[in-house]
Image (tube, grey):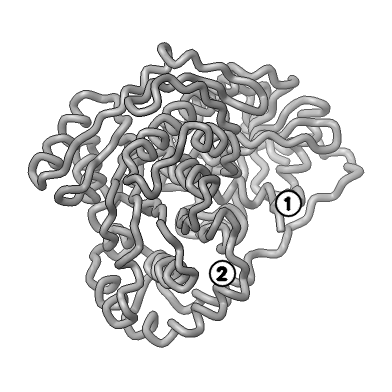
Amino acid sequence: MERADGAPGLSSKPAPHQWTEAPGDVLLDELFSYVSHGIEWGLGRMESFLGATGDPHLGIPCVHIGGTNGKGSVASTVASVLNGAGHRVGLYTSPHLCFLRERYQVGGVQVDDEELRELAGELDAEIRRHRLTFFEAATALAFHLFKRRQVEISVIEVGLGGRLDATNVVTPFLTAITNVDLDHCDYLGSTLDEIAKEKAGIIKAGVPLITTESDERIRSLIATQCDAVGAPFIRVESDVESMGVELKEDFTAFDVLTTRWGRLHLRTPLLGEHQAVNATLAVTLLEHMPPPFRPDPTTLVEGVSRVDWPGRVQVERLEGRTWVFDVAHNTAGAVALSAVLGRMELPRPLVLLTAVLGDKDWREMLPPLFETADHAILTQAPTAPLDRRWEPREAVTESGSGVAEIQTDFVRALDRARELAGSGTVVVTGSAHTVGDALRGLGLQGS
């Protein structure tokens, strides 16, 4: 353990529970060891591959959901309601926390490794021939999987940006943009306007676009793109003050005023005011579904209450202490997490365990998180790509925080967090890598 000033720290006492580096995702290494994991813009490879393999993405009704934060929460909520209504729903999200299979659900159930392995084997030659990147190959797998499983409707989350994202080959009947904030600036642009234009690239002619974006200027840019291509623009009011948001340890309750069903009182197991906004967007998408897919209000309320989306203010009890896991990976996410933590009555002390990717704006992310913590441990997530790892020492030095220390060994960082928290709370955040690695290390990764 190393103090923030670089001097050796006191050694930790042996802990009764020994954390371990859980095995990685064997399937991930097996299927995609040969593809590029970088970002190569353009839809040409994807379109050529799909054309050569039967265009599996066509013919399945699709909802396409983009935005900076919350798009996975919206997608999983829409899928939960549709599954509850008895439809066979294909849900594709990214990134995963622990295992590749998390990205693929049919009927609310993750697809097993063997099915993915078999399908990838069938497509291997064409994936190689078209030189697909990792995300393109993963997305192509989803389209073929959903066609094979004969899903009735697919809910597709945008990966990065929108205009040139590999998912933007779909022909949806509804699209959504949650919000626009600064993220992935190296690829999408350095200003909100530039990023908004990239995300608005999923807008299609004649296809309604629904958004909860609250910034008037950004909303105007999205509306302008809708006008340009002839897409109906639907703005969702998301004033949390008028929603009567109630936050408990295991749910968020709020009111939504709908055009079709009137006022609904909803509960989602996803915690935070921002999740009330995300759920409101999901409800509006469902409200605008064509009759075959439009749920009745009872089914809608039940479906929202059953959504399962791990790693989003996920609260667990383990060995007499509280753990909170959240994938906040940019400034907006960190601010939202800080706000939720401020409203929750969590046992103290509160220890922050964080590892942020080096291309993220950790200078803006860390202050709101430090403000909520009694102690903070900065570490490295083992699964973070080597070329995207941050420098914890630099982060501690620049932040000037008196609550932070460095422990780059992740297993030791988990043990140190446990020691400092005692019977209090550990908050694990900073990236999907950080949360996934912690869930594995703690034996909470699921089956």
Q: Mark 1 points at which residue?
A: 441
Q: Residues within 10 Å of mark 1 (few under 14, many from 20)?
A: some
Q: Which of marks 1 and 2 is nearer the N terminus?
A: 2
**Left or right: residue 232 compared with residue 74:** left
Q: Toward the viewer: 434 or 105?
A: 105
Please tell me whether residue 217 is drawn above or below residue 222 in the rendered image: above
Residue 83: % across, % down: 52, 49
Amino acid type of the residue tagged 2 in the rendering: Leu
Residue 316 image-quadrant placement:
top right
Q: Quadrant of the N terminus?
A: top right
**Mark 1 touching mark 2, by CB under 8 A?**
no
Does residue 9 appear in this view? no
The residue that appears at 63% across and 38% down in the rendered structure is: 325
Residue 386 point in image, percent of width and height: 51, 59
**SS of the residue under disc 1:** helix
Q: Residue at x 44, y 40 (%)?
A: 295
Name which residue lies at 35% across and 74% down.
Answer: 132
Q: In this view, does 127 lie above or below 3?
A: below
Where residue 446 appears, as percent x and y from the top left, is: 71, 54
Q: Which residue is tagged 2?
A: 28
Rendered location of residue 423, percent (x, y): 82, 26
